[in-house]
Image (cartoon, rainbow, N blue to C red):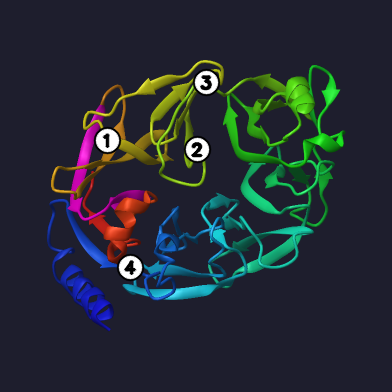
Amino acid sequence: MKRAIAAALSLLLLCGCAGVSKEPAHTNIGAPMVDYFDGAREISRNPWDMAVFDGKLYIGAGDYDKNTGPINLNAFDIKKRKWFDTGLLQDEEISVFRIYDDILYAPGIDPKSSWDYGNFYYTRGNEWTTVSNVPGGVHMFDMIQFDGKMFYGLGTGDYFIAPVKMSADGGKTYTNVPFYKDGKLLMAEEGFAYTRVYNFFILKNELYCYFRNYSESADIINKYGKGGIYKFDGSAFQYYDTFFGKISGENISYATIPAAETVGDTLYFTTGKFYKTEDLRTYTEIKMPDEGIVTDLLQENGELYVLSRKQQEDGNFKTTIWRYGETPTALYTIDFELGGQSFAKNGTTFYVGMGEKVKDIFIKKRDFIGTIFEVVNIK
């Protein structure tokens, strides 16, 4: 009840002053997942990703490691100024949103139903439609539209299942996309156990993915390696280059790369550390002026925006929204108990979701996980 009252007061304050002020300002608009994940499940309140679609702000949540689903996916109606439940999604975690052809997609990372098929969800702004027919999708980490087709990045449960499925008919039928290294077909031997494709990237009109081989067989590892970057040649993914030893990261998400954006001929991505690459072979780390951890990226009309957080001596965090050009420009900073986990943009308004994965921090500040701020008048 106290949280509901506090959220209502925040909204009243926002309605009373945001339309008058011309200066940037932020308002706490609530923590929508606090009533769904209580007890020892606070980490599931983390807003792993956010998206503005059809006048609503959608918030991801859940924990596929601790299995705290299903997910009551919440959204904020920007015009009506209220939170509402968009539906119960039968997965342990929703941490990625993708928008293609005026449709919002949400891959299901860990289905509550049979592991024979993976789930993804989509909406045109009304109800969610569930698609539960992706073969072998024990986990679905990413999806991307490329060359008129949809590609699905999976975590598999058996050695013979390809970790990428492709559909040319909107998810009615699927094709296995094979993987090759040095001319050898991967996943053709039992020793592979299971594989995962965590991320897709498009760079210079080419499709790449980040592939991991979790085999415990020394023979398989010696033959094929632990994974790396693979490039799509039109019918298969071919080994491109190693990924290991070239980058490092921070404990900000279950995903190694929670956010990536392509601007021109450069791919930017974050692992907690901020990198750029023009060839997915060599990587340059970008240091932010506040020396903060970079948790999210978004691109709009060729402009790249960066979200960073930096813990202060008093234990609180400064979260900064940056516009990244030749040099980063700080647009706005929020001081709060926790730091920013993800953000979204709607015109001159940003939404910032506060979260934390480091246990020692989120246990102490569990009541603040999933708090959402609206920042207005950012130009």
Disc 2 or 3, which lies upstream in sequence? 3
Helix, strand or loop at label 2? It is loop
Residue 274 relative to residue 152: left or right: left
The quadrant where residue 270 appears: top left
Is residue 130 one of those drawn in magenta?
Answer: no
* Residue type marked 1: Gly
The CA span between labels 3 and 1 is: 22 Å
Where 156 falls versus 362 (above or below)? above
The CA span between labels 3 and 4 is: 38 Å
* Residue type marked 2: Ile
Where 191 falls versus 40 (above or below)? above
Q: Residue at x 41, y 58 (%)?
A: 46
Q: Over which residues does the magenta segment extend?
A: 328-352
Count neighbours of disc 1 (C-alpha within 10 A) and say few if under 14, some if 14 to 19, many if 20 or more: many
* Residue type marked 3: Gly
Count neighbours of disc 3 (C-alpha within 10 A) and say few if under 14, some if 14 to 19, many if 20 or more: few
- The residue that label 4 is drawn on is 31
